[in-house]
Image (cartoon, helix red, strand yellow):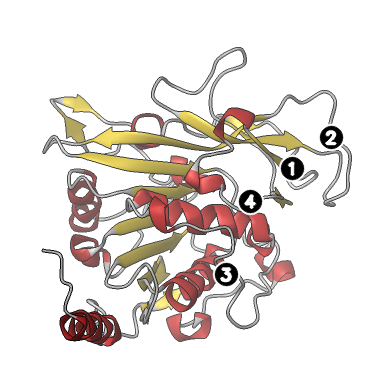
Amino acid sequence: MNVTNPLLRAAGAFLLLLAGCAAPPPHPVPDDPRWLTYSGVDGPGRGKHIVLVAAEQEYRSEQSMPMLAKVLATHHGFHCTVLFAQHDGLVDPTQKTTQEDKSIVHDIPGLEHLANADLLILFSRFMTLPPAQLAHITDYLDSGKPIFALRTANHGFLGAFPYQVNGKRVRFGEDVLGGTFLGHHGNWHADSTRGILVPEQLGHPILCGVTDVWGPSDVYRTYREGGSLPEGCTALVLGQPLLGRKHEDAPNPDKEPLPVAWTKTWTGNRGLTARVFHFTMGSGADFENEGVRRVAVNAAYWCMGLEDRITPDRSVACVGPYAPLDTGFDYAKLGVVPKPVAAYR
């Protein structure tokens, strides 16, 4: 109805203002010492809930996932919950995998909160989880809700992943994410990656405002030489291995660029189609780069169908200090020790 009465127009504007000023819905996850929660207040993410999982041993996700959660909550208004792989009540990136100790069963408290998540951001590596915890993940894969996977998530679960669709066993990396780790295309812990935005995709919302992507992690190979990403995957960023671990280092002329960021879809047992974004960069030090953070934040928006709210000037600045420890497994040298969850707030 076309309202021409100035008083009615003013009243309508006032009601809209009141609606915008209303308190956001409360965070859906209760406070608990086993996980971290960050409440979004105002922004495009108002009322949306993101669960971030830090469950690997090499790339300092226990530091980067709380950092990313704070960015998404503070600057963008998303409610965020960070879950960790733990041992004896402590966040423990030093815990072995079943490749090293067959008795190991990992523990990620809080996975039940995936039931009320609008997005899963997963950074796992060779996890062996009890059936009840794996069920929360496979239920999520059937939900039609989006998946954002970082680096080692494409080999995030060890052994046969207990999930089938239409009677066929699903390979988490290859089938859900579009590729698994086949080897280091770059030189492990010896070179770095320069991101090359795919020219045909410069208009994609995930690349909005992205001008420089670099990180000291190396490029993963996820398909065999001479191959390509599977059908249905759209590469957004290629990773060019460099000759060293500095931003200004020259490209390695013997290494072709390979995809490090792509989109696809996934359809589970309920026939619901989910958006998927996989970024094979994402070490703690990679996230010191603004371009890596912007790709990640934009991808969160895109995954949840909020791409029309992406702008090139939305802040991706870290909230408070962010000084991740170096990548690697030499925990004593790196200063990586088990800590309580609260240490990562």
Task: Give the residue displayed 79% in from the left and 43% down from the top.
Answer: 191
Q: Helix, strand or loop at disc 4?
A: loop
**Tags 1 and 2 touching, CB below 8 Å:** yes
Quarter of the figure with the N terminus: bottom left
**For the image shown, how many numbered marks are present on the structure?**
4
Task: Give the residue displayed 46% in from the left and 69% down from the top.
Answer: 72
Q: Helix, strand or loop at disc 2?
A: loop
Q: Is residue 339 left or right of residue 121?
A: right
Q: CA distance from mark 4 to mark 3?
A: 12 Å
Q: Nearer the viewer, residue 306 or 99?
A: 306
Above or below: residue 332 compared with residue 285: below
Q: Nearer the viewer, residue 149 or 161?
A: 149
Nearest to the eye among marks 3 and 1: give it. Answer: 3
The residue under label 2 is which amino acid type? Pro
The residue under label 1 is which amino acid type? Arg
Residue carrying label 4: 210
Q: Is residue 162 visible?
A: no
Q: Nearer the viewer, residue 275 or 33?
A: 275
